[in-house]
Amino acid sequence: MAFDYDLFVIGGGSGGVRAARIAAGEHGAKVALAEEYRMGGTCVIRGCVPKKLMVFASSYKTAIEDARSYGWAAEAGAFDWQAFRGKLDAELDRLEAAYRSGLKNAGVTTFDMRATVSDAHTVALADGRKVTAKHILIATGGRPAMPQAAAEAGALTSNDIFKLDALPKSVLIVGGGFIACEFACILNGLGVEVTQFYRGEQILRGFDGEARGHVAEEMRAQGVNLHVGTDVIEMKPVEGGTWVASTDGREAVYEKVVYATGRSPNTEGLGLEALGVKLGRKGEVVVDDWSQTAVPSIFAVGDVTDRINLTPVAIREGHAFADTIFGAKPTKADHELVASAVFTQPELGTIGMTEEEARDRGPIEVYTTAFRPMQTAFAGRPDRVMMKLIVCATTRRVLGCHIVAPGAGEMIQLAAIAIKMGATKEDFDRTVAVHPVMAEELVTLRKPVRTA
Ligand code: FAD
């Protein structure tokens, strides 16, 4: 049977765009892609990129204060959100255009509209057209999930923060995951009075316990009113903001409330279940190691599969899919030892097992250090950084590395290469330090602080 396309990709985010570009540009497949919002997806339009630019914006107040300690006659004026937002919007437009031209140059046909699946080889476009494809790739990503009561009371999600007309004076952030913590730090740095509630016992669930505690302490020290074991009981819109009653007996009015309590895969209304594509408990598309669903012609990559919800992982999954199906290069995306960073202030960079995970597989040695880094100590700030290695006591391999420090995202990227290669503690030890930098501590950790 002749199809209109070799591949139809639904979703123009990190995973979908990479798969389309590789399939068409490198392997010569006839490819189409539909995107219902803006090309580039979450990462470019309402995730990693605008978030990181806000992280940069929010870091200047302390940098200016520190500059004074170093002898500069610098004074932080007011932050101009409108000016920043204008530049941010222009940068996102530029990136979106770059994504579009990348697809065009690779020969991909694009449809700026929603698409759904009507059978194993047919895609229905929002304008009523139907197109057929030998393979369909679901790369629809995810969206913020919010309790209905919060939505009814006018709470915002991370998507809305980038579009605020003005910065609020005060904000309540509900949630303890990486997105909640990053926005707490960003808004705090921009001068907003930030309160954060997380119902669990410590923020950043899933990360190393000691690192979580360290980030929480530093966030509090920087001025975030962080309350763990605390949740919203009731909230309602009132004059000047939202009135919130919480489980710790507190009642307060916040100008804005932001919910960052998790994300849901975008599978609603896609027509997948009716075709026999298996969905998981959260609505994620269930796939095998080749990103193939229960329907052989339909594949899925990225956040919609809820494996590791990070941009570089979605990109690798999309690339592996295109190489496998169109490049005669069978490739499985590798989900082992994926490094990542949380852009709190200070950042958390992490790879491999947490101490808690490694302990269960034991025996392990734990090396850890916490200290005041030179740059901020000189400026009179109390900030402390933390570095930690988890080592297998039998193979000597470094199983995990966790860093809480300014620039930890950059540091962990490099440590990740060694750890992915299977570096042992002795490999770290025989690496001569770079001096004076914070990361030299990683190669001078002499004695384990504990074994398990
Ligand atoms: P997406 O990028 O979400 O793309 C899916 C696309 O599909 C969207 O553009 C959507 O509009 C479109 N779509 C959905 N349904 C349809 C349909 N039916 N028809 C047509 N189009 C459709 N990751 C990192 O690695 N580092 C970070 O620092 C980081 N920070 C983040 C910060 C925030 C605030 C958020 C929300 C996420 C962050 N992430 C980060 C995660 C990262 O953005 C995602 O893992 C990544 O974008 C997933 O790519 P994807 O291709 O699976 O989906």
Image: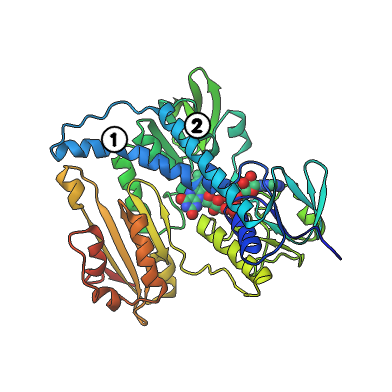
Q: In this view, does 316 lie above or below 88?
A: below
Q: State the residue position of label 1.
A: 61
Under mark 2, the amino acid is: Val
Specify the quadrant of the image occupied by residue 2: bottom right
Could you tell me which residue is drawn at 68 percent across and 58 percent down?
285
Callout 2: SS: strand
Q: In this view, does 54 lie above or below 387?
A: above
Could you tell me which residue is drawn at 52 percent across and 32 percent down?
163
Callout 1: SS: helix
For mark 1, does the 10 Å Cα neighbourhood hold few (<14), some (14 to 19), or many (20 or more) residues? some
Q: Is residue 227 at all visible to an observer of this figure?
A: no
For the residues labelled 1 and 2, say whether their Cβ atoms are less than 8 Å apart.
Answer: no
Of the 4 image quadrants, the one containing the N terminus is bottom right
The label on residue 257 is 2
- Name the residue nearer the viewer: 247 or 162: 162
Q: In this view, does 379 lie to the left or right of 188?
A: left
- Name the residue nearer the viewer: 69 or 23: 23
